Structure formats: C-alpha cells, structure tokens
C-alpha cells in the first residue's frame, strides 16, 4: 500500500472513532428516541456494551493508527540510512585512491612508471584488509573493487605524471 492509502485509512478510522465516541459518550438530558419505542429499550440494553466496547477498542484502535502513521513517516530513518551509505561509498572511493598510491609507493615506482595488474591486486588487497565492514555493508565484491581502483589510476597518473594502464 502507498502512503496515501495509509493516511486515508487513518483519517477514516479517526473520523469513525470520533463519531462512535461522540455517540457513546454523549449525555443528553432528554432521550433521542421516544420512551415508547422499541429502540429506546434496545438502547438501554446495548448502551453499556457500546460504552465498554468503545472504551476498550477505542484506545487500541487509536494506538494502532498512531503506530502506523509513525512507521509511515519515518522519513528521517531512510534519509539517515542513505546518508550513511553515501559516506561509506565515498570512504571506499577514497580508500581506493589511497590504496593505489600505497601500491605505487610499496613498489618503489617513480614518476613515469606503468601501473601493472600486480599493483591493482596490491591495492585491492589493501582495501579489503583495511575496510572489510564497509565492503560487506555496501555489497562490493573484489571485482567491483578492482574496477573502482582502476578508475582511480588516471587520477594517480596526474599526480605521478605517468601513463595510466591497467
């Protein structure tokens, strides 16, 4: 169901609760139905049941509707989750850039060196070792990580002035 349906149901339930509650708890001085009518006698019999039903079911119904509306309007939780995922994704990309720099430094390469597949593997293992939780949370596989690291090679090439090859 969409949120519009939930809101419509909630509004109808509140209106029904108000109408039933008004009828059940109204205390008019004069009876609405003539005393000689069968409806008057029936109401005299059913009124305690209606009041009891309203006093038991009413709060439960309102609590249930309130819980549904609160669950529906948890936009901040979704926004927070998306914000955390964005931060994790940015951290993975920053870690990939750092990993390729680490691999170049570890190999002792100088400006103008060629980036080899072994450097990409070293960088991949560096990121997997340093950020296993973030990779698992985002569902990034090693192949995806290699692609991310390979995408950072041109940025590294600008820094070390080397031609970028994977």
Image (cartoon, rainbow, N blue to C red):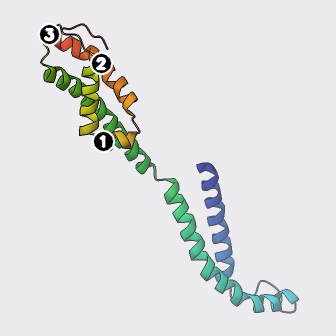
Q: Quadrant of residue 57?
A: bottom right
Earlier along the polypeptide chain: callout 2 or callout 1?
Answer: 2
Helix, strand or loop at disc 2?
Answer: helix
Percent position of residue 107, x then y: 15, 20
**Does residue 7 show up?**
yes
Earlier along the polypeptide chain: callout 1 or callout 3?
Answer: 3
Q: Is residue 88 above or below residue 41?
A: above
- Disc 1 to disc 3: CB gap under 8 Å: no
Q: CA distance from mark 3 to mark 2?
A: 17 Å
Nearer the observer, 70 or 88: 88
Mark identifier at residue 111: 3
Q: Residue at x 35, y 29 (%)?
A: 145
Percent position of residue 136, x then y: 37, 42
Q: Which residue is mark 1?
A: 132
- Specify few, some or many for label 3: CA neighbours under 10 Å numbering under 14, 14-19, or 20 or more: few
Q: Quadrant of the C terminus?
A: top left
Q: Quadrant of residue 165?
A: top left
Q: Residue at x 57, y 74 (%)?
A: 60
Percent position of residue 5, x then y: 64, 52
Q: Which residue is mark 2?
A: 117
Q: Quadrant of residue 148?
A: top left
Residue 63 lies left or right of residue 97; in this view the side is: right
Helix, strand or loop at disc 1?
Answer: helix
Which one is in front in this view, the residue at disc 2 or the one at disc 1?
2
Helix, strand or loop at disc 3?
Answer: loop
Q: CA distance from mark 1 to mark 3?
A: 31 Å
Q: Residue at x 22, y 12 (%)?
A: 157
Q: CA distance from mark 2 to mark 1?
A: 22 Å
């Amino acid at each position: 169901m969409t949120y519009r349906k939930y809101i419509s149901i909630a509004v109808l339930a509140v209106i029904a609760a108000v109408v039933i509650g008004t009828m059940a708890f109204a205390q008019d001085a004069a009876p609405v139905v003539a005393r000689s009518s069968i409806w008057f006698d029936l109401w005299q019999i059913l009124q305690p049941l209606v009041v009891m039903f309203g006093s038991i079911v009413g709060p439960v119904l309102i609590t249930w509707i309130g819980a549904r509306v609160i669950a529906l309007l948890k936009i901040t939780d979704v926004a927070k989750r998306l914000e955390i995922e964005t931060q994790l994704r940015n951290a993975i990309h920053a870690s990939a850039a750092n990993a390729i720099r680490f691999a170049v430094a570890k190999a002792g390469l100088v400006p103008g060196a060629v980036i080899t597949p072994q450097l990409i593997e070293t960088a991949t293992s560096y990121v997997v070792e340093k950020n296993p939780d973030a990779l698992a949370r985002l569902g990034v596989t090693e192949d995806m990580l290699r692609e991310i690291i390979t995408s950072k090679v041109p940025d590294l090439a600008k820094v070390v002035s080397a031609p970028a090859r994977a």
